[in-house]
Amino acid sequence: MSRTPLDTVEHAAETPDVELPWAELGLKKDEYERVVEILGRRPTGAELAMYSVMWSEHCSYKSSKVHLRQFGEKAPQSDALLVGIGENAGVVDVGQGYAVTFKVESHNHPSYVEPYQGAATGVGGIVRDIIAMGARPVAVVDPLRFGAADHPDTKRVLPGVVAGIGGYGNCLGLPNIGGEVVFDACYQGNPLVNAGAIGVMRHEDIHLAKASGAGNKVILYGARTGGDGIGGASILASETFDDAKPSKRPAVQVGDPFQEKLLIECTLEAFAEKLVVGIQDLGAAGLSCATSELASNGSGGMRVTLDDVPLRDSTLSPEEILMSESQERMCAVVEPEKVDRFLEICDKWDVIATVIGEVTDGDRLEIFWHGGKIVDVDPRTVAHDGPVYERPYARPDWQDALQADDANKLARPGSGEELKDQVLKLVASPNQASKSWITSQYDHFVQGNTVLAQPEDSGMIRIDEETGLGVAIATDGNGRYAKLDPYAGAQLALAEAYRNVATTGAKPLAVSDCLNFGSPEDPAVMWQFAEAVRGLADACLQLGTPVTGGNVSLYNQTGEAAIHPTPVVAVLGVIDDVARRTPVAFQEEGQLLYLLGDTREEFGGSAWSQVIHDHLGGLPPKVDLERERLLGEILISASRDGMIDSAHDLSDGGLIQAVVESALLGGKGARLVVPDGLDAFTFLFSESAGRAVVAVPRSEEVRFNDMCGARGLPVARIGVVDGTASDSNAVVELQGEFALSLEELREAHEGTIPALLA
Amino acid sequence: MTARIGVVTFPGSLDDRDTQRAIRLAGAEPVALWHKDKNLHQVDAVVLPGGFSYGDYLRAGAISRFSPVMETVIEQAKAGLPVLGICNGFQILTEAHLLPGGMLGNDHLHFICRDQKLRVENADTAWTADYTAGQEIHIPLKNMDGRYVADAYTLDQLEAEGRVVFRYVDFNPNGSLRDIAGITNEAGNVVGLMPHPEHAVEPLIGSGRTDGLPFFTSILKKLVNA
């Protein structure tokens, strides 16, 4: 990218033979040729920079687009959806005039290279997406996946990621209310750091990313632009890691949460005074993305003077300014007469704000530098008309053998003593163990509206103090299930998140997803992706929960080894009064424990098969979405009518995992009996979907049974809450088989993670 | 008649709105104060809320201490204005030398968020009169730099004068010397503590307890009865 003479549009037209470093910027040869064809000349260096980042896998979804269309084509009819896929984040109507926006994104690659900053800026990015919709952010969630818990590199990556999420989110004043932490050797070298956020606004406050109205000013505000994160989207997030290449650390951005907090407050103040016509945050692809998306979504064109961009490093070239992913920046479109007030608000919050351009009545995006025009493009060709690939995909040849390796045939425990031993091993295993060492590094009290936070089934936030209206969110994914069957695995992820929301008493409304996969250039991975998307789209249609947006993260692989296909699904729900939320913890001795749903011999991909046999094979649990919907309705009704005092969804680890968690959280024991038709082992460890365990006060027993019977949901009484922690003989007991004291269980469940990571 | 209690918003304050809510729930009138404004707008008491003012850059509270509003707060606190510093507010009060000692990073080097058990050691301050001495309460705690330190002479003096207001019980979450969670000045009008009483004022929210509400009812009664 020669800077002398300045590579203007004119200069580019005159020097068609100049070689540009398109390959180094991550473009393929045919993609570069397409750029030349669009422009009718070679691009300038600045134009090349813009196309290269905007046409990257990360920004353009070029490999995934053809599949993602199903989320629109199969979208269920929903009155709740106010803004769908394509904006910074989807928006859902939750009633009483409130709208909620939420989204999950990935920051996987940066978090492996530089765990603290990678994870921190992941939080920063998703929060700016929420602000850009016009909402006040009210909570964050973080689904995380790491390599084996005892691998030395996990001790480098995990503490950094957790400190980064905490360091950034805590400083923004956002309660962290949910997420997951999963360990599996397949994520060694490719940890998955997904970050979700929720924001709340009134219906009339929804803002969109578009620049309309010729003469309106384009204001860049927030941090100065520096050399950090250049090419983050193209060369970092869109390629496979390779040991032979140099470190990509300079492509990771550095976060300043204090600056972002100021950005939140000044943006919300500007919204409140109705000063903003359109708004876009600067994330992946920085100014290239913000200017081209604002311009292409609006009615006119845009003219920008790059010399006016406040810089941290005065030596940056125009190409670098366009590609920089410096954090904590936003771009607003403001009517000329409101510019002074907008700048005043920024000044009040000590936020730098600069008019860098204006909306024009043409249809071109023009960018100037030192008086020369260095970009002259149709913004749609940059933002929306990127390449679309029909990548070849094929069911991998190992899939049949994997499914034939039936987990139901693994050796089972033969005695009460063996069952007891395996229960202890299970609840102490890294994936099933308490994650409080991690979650205690996140603030979950700030803003004073947190009703439920991890380890509850879903996080819950009150959004109206008068009426008690609230929202719940759960994120789930199970890469082991998805590896065995990506179609079913994606549906099971949705089913679990849906169930988790309903378990707390909230009605599931909408979905956001973060689809984490290996390289799309591998047909086997592409098949996993296609199957997962198809499964998720079909299931969303059946459950009536539209996908409102999300994120695809590909190239999560090192060399030939891809991660398990890992669709992570977030479900957002609404609850009309948070006072009736149902917690996980056992509340009172004497309450009756009921198992809802059908329990089958389903051990494929189960926690039991992993912990006891280090095995992955067979088929994942059967999906029955109508059953999930019925179970959800029962759980919500039971919460509304005060029939249950605690509830816990059954998923990985099965019934015994759920009962142990409820017991430890409530400081109460439980005495269990195996219901008719089941053996003790299947009762304890099966991972059949569509199930929950609830505690019913004796006074409600008849009413509760009648309701389940009338609606056709199988229920079985499986025991009673009995004994308190202060009374040292409190136990979790399976009658006739074993008893484990709460102390013993607590030590096993809570000791693992600190021992490995502290 | 009620009392008007100011809550200062510094850049990076996080719990300012929560503190205003707690004041309202206690029956007093919250008044938002801005860090660039020296005028306290005739409030009867001031709370410096939690958060990461100025990102905790340089040192927690070190920059906010020089805000215009603090000039007036310092001057009036010395004349008897009741002032409560919560978490970052406590850090600002030590930086401003309204309270002795200072805060270092937690001894375990991690941010910590938990429902913390405390013992009320002094129920005679302007902010703790609705507690009883020796009472044990649970208040959420969340901080990165919460390790209270002072020299041995100062610590002895605080103990001798009954100026340790709260102590951590069962578990010291940050390595604070002598398990000190909160202290007061000689006059008892300025109190600082690391835990967050404003997050324990409603039965459904946060920790699910209301052990923090007496902070705000204490000051309200004192001001209304004055």
Image (cartoon, coloured by chain):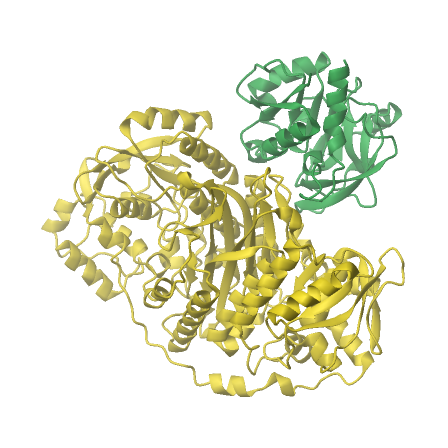
Chain colours: A yellow, B green
**Visible in this render: residue A18?**
yes
Which of the 4 quarters of the picture holds residue A463? top right
Say if A41 sits above or below A137 in the image.
below
**Visible in this render: residue A432?**
no
Tell me the residue at 80%/83% (across/down). A415
Tell which of A383 and A278 is nearer to you: A278
Tell me the residue at 74%/57% (across/down). A665
Q: Residue furthest top?
A: B79
Tell which of A268 and A78 is nearer to you: A78
| Drawn side of residue A181 relative to residue A343, left or right | right
Image quarter in which the C terminus of chain A is found: bottom right
| Drawn side of residue B122 relative to residue A655, left or right | right
Say if A127 sits above or below A35 in the image.
above
| Drawn side of residue A585 relative to residue A250, left or right | right
Tell me the residue at 79%/17% (across/down). B187
Percent coordinates x, y for residue B158 in the rendering: 83, 26
Tell me the residue at 73%/62% (across/down). A695
Which of the 4 quarters of the picture holds residue B46? top right
Tell which of B94 and B151 is nearer to you: B94
Q: How many marks are shown on the rendered structure? A: 0
Percent coordinates x, y for residue A757 in the rendering: 67, 59
Percent coordinates x, y for residue A737 in the rendering: 83, 78
Which of the 4 quarters of the picture holds residue B105? top right
Percent coordinates x, y for residue A261 in the rendering: 50, 37
